[in-house]
């Protein structure tokens, strides 16, 4: 007898082929496709519904949150059954005793502040700790470049010595041996921002040897994006590694005319034989830590040095000058989004919660200060634990990149008091708004971009498809009604339309209702097919 039978549904299996009729049987956490009824302990009638593989989020910021909220309802309710964490070159491991305190502060700016002991030091230690949790979705891990660099040479703004580069390479190999699916980089965040192309090429050679992936928040998504793409493609060309662009977009109306050249670079890379992929969230606004508005030199030495510089009036004036005039190669968020287009999403201290939801102009008005001084004060007083949402693009641009063959869907969701709505709705927004309502592509293409495509990209061996013997990560979707609910004003609203979410054969959403239990696993890289 099987554990679960899902019958009468329309299967969209992750391959990209047209939907078809078949029943899905599940036993001991594995899938078998069957015709007709069979005996099962639980029968789910999916008549009029889609049955698909669970969605795979290739850019997630749950590496710390999962320790406090392992069920991760915002992700499950939009169909996500696997998350790839430790993005943008910043993660919980590896870490050493010397740097654990400043690194916690650095991580807090991106993923929030959590009051629990870091019992791990290596990637393997961290994954072992996560495995003990009552996980909802599965968790996969990237080795963060910032961590590798920190462990090898600290947080200094300089080139590594030959010995330090070898230490970085060894740390990357060790992380992959312990289960990492590749390496993430955050080329606008310290200490990743201090690395040059040669450092990344050497690390890329390790990724080539292990057939893992180079995942990058590139140096520029604005004025210097074309040059930034050239750098990533050259890293891939010289090292031979796979290249994956995180949260792909072009920021600022002054840069929208670059789109044809961007698409040409992707086309040329494919013709050359470079393996390139990208993920994208389906919104015209982004979200990250507020301190990205500060020039790169302000970050040198870590969060404590940043706070010191924000307390120096002369240095503040220099910051304002650099924001006004720009720095070659630096993504100037205030330039491309404007003070009125950057909104505060979370803060550290309760007394500052009143500023959440304000843009920087409104913050200046509320505090009676120049907007620059107001936000500099807030970043300083909140010890760099301030988040932002920034508006940078258009719907047409979102659809242009979404339609690309290289694209798969992600959330890039960062938790906060008023988070970006992508945390709750990215995947179902693609399915409901862009696929069903706007008919940008057929449903089999949409599902492939959420399942088989990301599984192939990162190297998951038994997920992303409805195939015999594959892990039973399965969704039953009310396609007629699936949609994201949250918006920028009220983002914390669970998505609608995922009637059932099954992870490793255990039902975590049952007829639209939460059923928390231990279901997810820590997935560790085991090579490619």
Image (cartoon, rainbow, N blue to C red):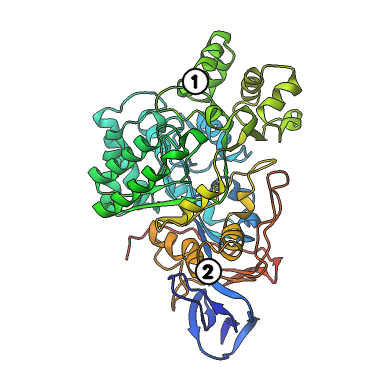
Q: Is residue 310 left or right of residue 202?
A: right
Q: Nearer the viewer, residue 209 or 494?
A: 494
Image point (49%, 20%), residue name: 298
Q: Earlier in the sequence, mark 1 or mark 2?
A: 1
Mark 1 and 2 residues: CB-CB less than 8 Å, in contact?
no
Q: Position of residue 161 (x, y in %)?
A: 27, 27
| Label 2, residues with CA under 10 Å away: few <14, some 14-19, many ≥20 | many
Q: Which mark is residue 78?
A: none
Residue 208 vs 290, above or below: the answer is below
Which residue is drawn at the image coordinates 67% and 17% (left, top)? 370
Q: Residue at x 63, y 57 (%)?
A: 71
Per the image, the residue denoted by label 1 is 298
Above or below residue 493? Residue 448 is below
- Categorize mark 1 by other alpha carbons within 10 Å: few (<14), some (14-19), many (20+): many
Spatial CA span between label 1 and label 2:
46 Å
Mark linked to residue 443: 2
Image-based side of 380 in relation to 261, left or right: right
Quadrant in the picture for the C terminus: bottom left
Percent coordinates x, y for residue 218 in the rendering:
41, 39
**Front one among 486 and 76:** 486
């Amino acid at each position: 007898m099987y554990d679960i039978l899902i019958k009468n549904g329309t299967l969209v299996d992750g391959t990209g082929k047209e939907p078809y009729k078949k029943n899905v049987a599940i036993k001991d956490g594995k899938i078998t496709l069957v015709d007709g009824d069979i005996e099962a302990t639980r029968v789910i009638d999916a008549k009029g519904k889609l049955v698909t593989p669970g969605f795979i989020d290739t850019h997630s910021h749950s590496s710390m949150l999962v320790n406090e909220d392992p069920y991760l309802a915002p992700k499950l309710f939009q169909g996500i059954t696997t998350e790839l964490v430790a993005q943008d070159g910043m993660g919980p491991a590896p870490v050493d005793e010397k740097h654990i305190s400043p690194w916690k502060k650095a991580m807090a700016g991106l993923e929030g502040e959590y009051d629990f002991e870091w019992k791990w030091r290596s990637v393997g230690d961290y994954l072992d700790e996560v495995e003990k949790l009552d996980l909802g979705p599965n968790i996969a891990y990237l080795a963060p470049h910032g961590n590798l660099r920190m462990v090898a040479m600290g947080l200094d703004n300089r080139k590594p010595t030959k010995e330090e580069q070898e230490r970085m390479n060894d740390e990357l190999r060790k992380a992959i041996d312990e289960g990492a699916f590749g390496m993430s980089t955050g080329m606008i965040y310290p200490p990743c921002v201090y690395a040059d192309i040669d450092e990344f090429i050497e690390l890329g050679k390790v990724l080539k040897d292990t057939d893992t992936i180079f995942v990058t928040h590139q140096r520029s998504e604005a004025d210097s994006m074309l040059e930034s793409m050239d750098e990533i493609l050259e890293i891939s060309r010289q090292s031979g590694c796979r290249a994956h662009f995180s949260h792909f977009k072009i920021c600022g109306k002054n840069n929208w005319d670059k789109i044809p050249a961007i698409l040409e670079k992707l086309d040329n890379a494919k013709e050359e034989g470079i393996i390139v992929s990208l993920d994208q969230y389906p919104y015209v606004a982004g979200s990250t830590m507020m301190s990205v508005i500060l020039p790169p030199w302000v970050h040198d030495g870590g969060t404590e040095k940043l706070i010191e510089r924000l307390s120096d009036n002369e240095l503040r004036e220099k910051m304002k000058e650099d924001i006004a005039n720009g720095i070659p190669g630096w993504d100037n968020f205030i330039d491309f989004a404007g003070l009125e287009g950057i909104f505060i999403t979370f803060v550290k201290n309760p007394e500052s919660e009143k500023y959440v939801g304000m843009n920087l102009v409104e913050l200046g008005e509320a505090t009676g200060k120049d907007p620059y001084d107001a936000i500099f004060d807030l970043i300083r007083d909140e010890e760099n634990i301030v988040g932002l949402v920034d508006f940078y693009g258009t719907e047409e641009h979102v659809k242009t990149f979404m339609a690309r063959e290289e694209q798969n869907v992600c959330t890039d969701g960062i938790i906060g008091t008023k988070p970006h709505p992508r945390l709750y709705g990215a995947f179902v927004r693609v399915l409901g708004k862009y696929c069903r309502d706007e008919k940008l592509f057929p449903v089999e293409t949409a599902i492939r971009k959420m399942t088989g495509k990301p599984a192939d990209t990162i190297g998951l061996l038994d997920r992303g498809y409805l195939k015999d013997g594959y892990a039973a990560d399965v969704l039953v979707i009310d396609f007629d009604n699936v949609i994201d609910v949250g918006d920028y004003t009220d983002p914390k609203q669970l998505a609608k339309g995922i009637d059932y979410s099954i992870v490793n054969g255990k039902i975590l959403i049952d007829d639209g209702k939460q059923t928390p239990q231990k279901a997810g696993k820590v997935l560790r890289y085991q090579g490619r097919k």
